Image (cartoon, rainbow, N blue to C red):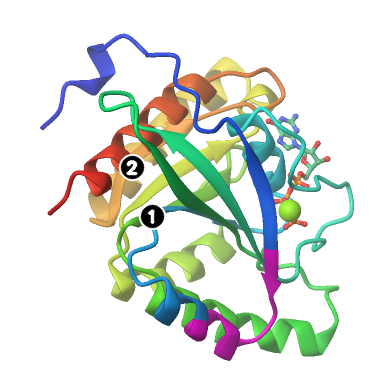
Amino acid sequence: MSTRKNQPVKKVNLSKNIEFVRGFSDEHSVKTWFEENPHAIGLAVVGKSNVGKSTLINALFSHKIARASKTPGKTREINLFKFSFEHYETQKIHQLYLFDLPGFGYARVAKELQSEWPTLMESFFREAPPSVLLLYLQDSRLPNGSTDQQFMSYITPYDRPSFLVFSKLDKLNQKERAQLSKEEKNLQLLYPWIMESHQVSAEENRGIDKLKDRIAHYIVSCLTRP
Ligand SMILES: Nc1nc2c(ncn2[C@@H]2O[C@H](COP(=O)(O)OP(=O)(O)OP(=O)(O)O)[C@@H](O)[C@H]2O)c(=O)[nH]1
Ligand SMILES: [Mg+2]
């Protein structure tokens, strides 16, 4: 096992530039894109509506690219971004991808959109190669809530390399943080697809550099795979 917890955090820049490519609203376009880009490398962000996905993306890329909003359920398509990533050893520039996935579990989203969520997501999780790392966000205040339990049962068979990220850490007091750390350990034991877990606050810029460092590490391992 790695001793990453004791290693100093490098300041990693995930991207020098990132731009929106397109949205996907149906399963066929997702399938076609992955057929055309079978070796895509990058990351995908998923979690309950309003958990802070767009805010985290903006913090990771130091850029206002993903719309953060106070109205839950805003991101209803899969939004695809591309970004250039400089390998920190070879200095080679690679084009990578970021997928902002629609939030789940928001009751007031129009019915037809809710019914599209499973097919859209299923095609994504089926088609995306393991070199697309999943960042799965849970709200620090409600770890392992019932909607998240459902999602974890749903995602388990896909066995996707994932980081579990607890968002909005700034909302917790010390006692709640200790409780969260316990829950975090339990979840890591229960779900083998959780490679790492992180506690972050985009609001206070806590845990963000470490998360960036670990994402870059995963990306580099994909780039150097034969
Ligand atoms: N206190 C605090 N608030 C946050 C943090 N991250 C996000 N928020 C707030 O949470 C709300 C939702 O954030 P978004 O980033 O839009 O959430 P989302 O998961 O993208 O939402 P959908 O796209 O609707 O699924 C916004 O009001 C953010 O300002 C954080 O680290 N701390
Ligand atoms: Mg969003």
- Does 189 sit left or right of 42 as displayed? left
Q: Is residue 11 above or below residue 24?
A: above
Give yes or no for residue 25 being in the magenta stretch.
yes
Residue 67 locus on image (x, y percent):
81, 48
Q: Residue furthest top?
A: 8
**Nearer-the-camera pick, 91 or 72:** 91
Q: Which residue is mark 2?
A: 219
Q: Is residue 196 above or below residue 178?
A: below
Q: Nearer the viewer, residue 183 or 93?
A: 93
Mark 1 within 8 Å of ligand 2, using the beta carbon: no
Evaluate if marks 1 and 2 touch, with contact meaning CB atoms under 8 Å apart: yes
Q: Give, as a single range, the part of the protein colored magenta.
A: 22-32
Q: Nearer the viewer, residue 95 or 193?
A: 95
Res. 144 visible in picture: no
Mark 1: few/some/many CA within 10 Å (<14, 14-19, 20+) = many
Q: Residue at x 46, y 48 (%)?
A: 95
Tag 2's secondary structure?
helix
Q: Secondary structure at mark 1?
A: loop
